[in-house]
Amino acid sequence: MANILVYGLAHEGTVNKNSRGAVSEAAKVASELGGEAHAVLVGTNVDDALAQQLGAVGATKVWTVNAAEGVAQTAADAISALVEAQGYDYVVFGGGLLGFEIGAAVAAAIGGGITVEATELAVDGGRLVAKRPIFGDTLLSTSHYKGKGVIVARTNAFEVKETGGSATVESFDAPASAAAGQVTLKVRGEQRGADINIEDAQILVTGGRGLGTAENFSVADGLAAAFGSGAAVGATRAVVDAGWFPYAGQVGQTGKTVAPKLYVGLGVSGAIQHKVGMQSSENVLAINKDENAPIFEFADFGVVGDLHKIAPALTEAIKAKKG
C-alpha cells in the first residue's frame, strides 16, 4: 500500500486552495496505488474543523503538528520526521513559494527526488509519476522516482474536488527543530497586491508596462475596487522588475499561475512567459494601444486604444451599473 502525504498550508482558519487541490489530486492517484491520501497541518492553532477541510476533499487521515506556523524550516523538519516515521514514499505540496521552499528542504532531508511546477499526477508501473510542462509549456516532462518522491504543484494546477468525506485526525509529536530557536515569525502583514491572494481572485486586473509609471497603477486599483470583493490587482514581470509592483502580485512563468473568471490586462503585451501564468482564465479582456500586441491573439475581448481613458470609463460604468 502506498499512501501519499500532502502538506496543508493554512492561514486564519482556512486551508489554502492549492493545498486542497493537491489533496484531491493525491486521492485520485492513491486509489490506483492501493493507498490513501493523507495530509499534515503544521501550526499552533490547528483544530478538527481545519483538518476536516482536507477530509472534505479526499484526505482520509490528517496529521497535526504543533509547531511554529509560517517558518519553512520548522515545517520541513516536522514533515520529514513524519515521512520517516510513517514510511511515506511520496509527499505533495500545493503551488506557491512556501511550497517550493519546504518541498526542497523535505526532499533533501529524506533523500528523495523532487519535481516542481507539476500539473498532473499519474501511476505508471505501480509507481507514482509527476508530469510538468517544459520549454514554455510546449512539451510535457514525466518524472519517475526510484525511491521517495517530492512533488510541488504549479499554482492552480489541481482542481479542488469535494467528496463530502471526513478524515481521522491524529497528532504527531515531531522532534524539536533546530530552526525553532533561530527563526521567529514576528509579523504576518499585508502588502500591496497581496491583500487578496491573486491565485484565488475571481477577477484579476493586471497591469503591464503600458501603464507607464508606478503611480498609474491607481487606474488598475480603481478598476479592481469597482468590481468589488473577490477582485485583485496583479502585474507582469517587466513591471515587477521595474519596481512598480511587489513580486507577490507577479503573474507568469516566473511568478504565479492564476485562473480567474475574468482577467483584465491593462497595457499587457501578452508575451508567452506571461501567457503561461494566466492562460487558464475563463475570460480575458485586453486593453492596449498596440493593435499588434500578442495578447489580442488569445483574448476573448479586445479593446485597442488608450487604457488611461478606457479603464477609467469602464470603472465608472461598473459603478453606475451597481448603483
Image (cartoon, rainbow, N blue to C red):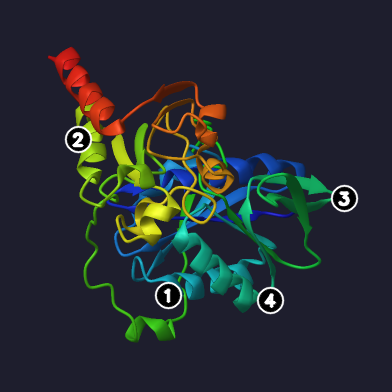
- The CA distance from mark 3 to mark 1 is 35 Å
Mark positioned earlier in the residue sequence (2 or 1) = 1
Upstream in sequence: badge 3 or badge 4: 4
Q: Secondary structure at mark 1?
A: helix
Residue 310 at least partly seen: yes
Amino acid under label 2?
Gly
Residue placed under numbered mark 2 in the picture: 222
Where's the C terminus, which quadrant?
Answer: top left
State the residue position of label 1: 74
In the rendered structure, find residue 125 and report the number of the disc placed on it. Answer: 3
Q: x%, y% of residue 183?
A: 33, 81
**What distance separates the C-alpha of mark 1 from that of mark 4?**
18 Å
Q: Earlier in the sequence, mark 3 or mark 1?
A: 1
In the depicted view, which residue is nearer to us: 8 or 314? 314
Task: Pick the residue in front: 103 or 243.
Answer: 243
Instruction: Residue under label 4, please give it.
Output: 111
CA neighbours of label 2 inside 10 A, class few (<14), some (14 to 19), many (20+): some
Residue 179 image position (x, y, % from top left)? 40, 83
Q: How far apart are labels 2 and 1 at the CA level?
A: 40 Å
